[in-house]
Amino acid sequence: MPVDPKLHLDANIPWSEPAWLRGVPSPYYNESHRTLQRRVRAVGTDDQKRRWLPGLFARETSFSLGVTEPSGGSDVARLATTAERTPDGSAYVVNGVKKWITGTPWATHMTTAVRTRTTTTAGPRRASSPGESMGKGSSGESMGKGGSTTTTTGDSTRDGISLLVIPMDAPGVVHQKIHNSGQNAGGASYVYLENVRVPADHLLGRENDGFRVVMQNFNRERFLLTVACNRKARSCLAMALQYATRRETFGRPLVRNQVIRRKLAELAHRIEAHWAWLEQLAYQVSSSASTSASGSRGGGWDDAAIASTVALLKVQGGQLIELAAREAAQVFGGAAYQKAGPGAAVEQINRDLRMLVVGGGSEEIIADLAVRLELAMMGALAAPKL
């Protein structure tokens, strides 16, 4: 079936328009559902399609995506959650902890990245209880009972990662909401998995092939996040401009001051340039999808050639929203420090933006990734590990 070249340009709209609104969770949160739908359609068995897809549209089934862990965020290859086959091969027994899992409070299932083949053993496999795991940081260290310290580093290789669809009501699954400074409507949570028995037919795709699937998902996830960054930045610009024309200081509107106009101009040219690059990438993805539909492999969002561009767009988007939120706050002054009044939206964006900047991979990680991907395509480096 031919693909409309404008497909992904138009698809930007449902992701970008809600970003104008404050107090509304980003539509990025729904990407977990879309991820499962695409993967089930692509690699799922007929039984899995009959079991899970209808419920997505009937609102009987809600999925979260369980990848990030306390011991590693962007470094997916180091995940420590294990899934061991039972002797009869009918099920997996899963142990581990997931963190920052969006949508957990209302999810019925979690598409979970687990380690099904371990080449090295590092740290305990028993899932920490909610009380034991509080305070885990990026180092993976957690204070256990009695103040003792244990370290879970995981396996540092890509091999042996699989995707399991885990029912959230299965015995041994416990979740605990994380209360953050912003984006609390997203329901980010810890998910503790202790001796959770998952039927073997809940394996999505091939065993030990999950790393590739997770990495492919990052392209679309990062793109959606950077679209939201641009729209939030545009909101900051619009609100700052409106406020500057109405607010008077020393007998004249703020916008009459050259330093204020300079701030507005700086934001405007950065926002428009970033959006133009987003549209360029969207067209490239559409064209790649058309090529893939005609018989080649790896098109659309799975195209390896777009990964570095998406990463750089995400870096630029994060820097853009940080700058826009700061400059808007400077224009609003003390009003941007209040949770009510004319600057309330700017105040909230300043609290919420950290998820947009760090989500999908921190700036430091993905900026380096972009360079290594380009070098790898030139043959100068082996394929980068992330």
Image (cartoon, rainbow, N blue to C red):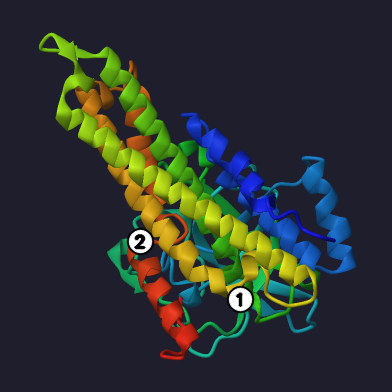
User: What quarter of the picture does the N terminus occupy?
Assistant: bottom right
In the image, 381: left or right of 331? right
Instruction: Give the residue type at disc 2.
Output: Glu
Residue 142 in picture, x, y percent from top left: 35, 64
Disc 1 secondary structure class? helix
Residue farthest left in this picture: 250
Residue 231 in picture, x, y percent from top left: 46, 39
Q: How crowded is mark 1: few (under 14 residues within 10 Å), some or many (20 or more)?
A: some
In the image, 276: left or right of 193? left
In the image, 140: left or right of 336? right
Instruction: Give the residue type at disc 1.
Output: Arg
Tell me: residue 41, above or below residue 236.
below
Tell me: residue 93, above or below residue 378.
above
Q: Residue at x 25, y 21 (%)?
A: 335
Residue 226 in picture, x, y percent from top left: 47, 51
Q: Which mark is residue 176?
A: none
Q: Residue at x 73, y 60 (%)?
A: 38
**244 vs 203, nearest the viewer:** 244
Q: Mark 2 points at which residue?
A: 363
**295 vs 342, nearest the viewer:** 295
Residue 214, visible in the rendered structure: yes
Tell me: residue 37, above or below residue 228.
below
Q: Mark 1 points at which residue?
A: 212
Residue 178 in picture, x, y percent from top left: 44, 46
- In the rendered picture of this protein, how many numbered marks are placed on residues? 2
How far apart, in angstroms, are the residues tagged by discs 2 and 1? 21 Å
Residue 168, visible in the rendered structure: no
User: Which dot, 2 or 1, sits closer to the camera?
Assistant: 2
Disc 2 secondary structure class? helix
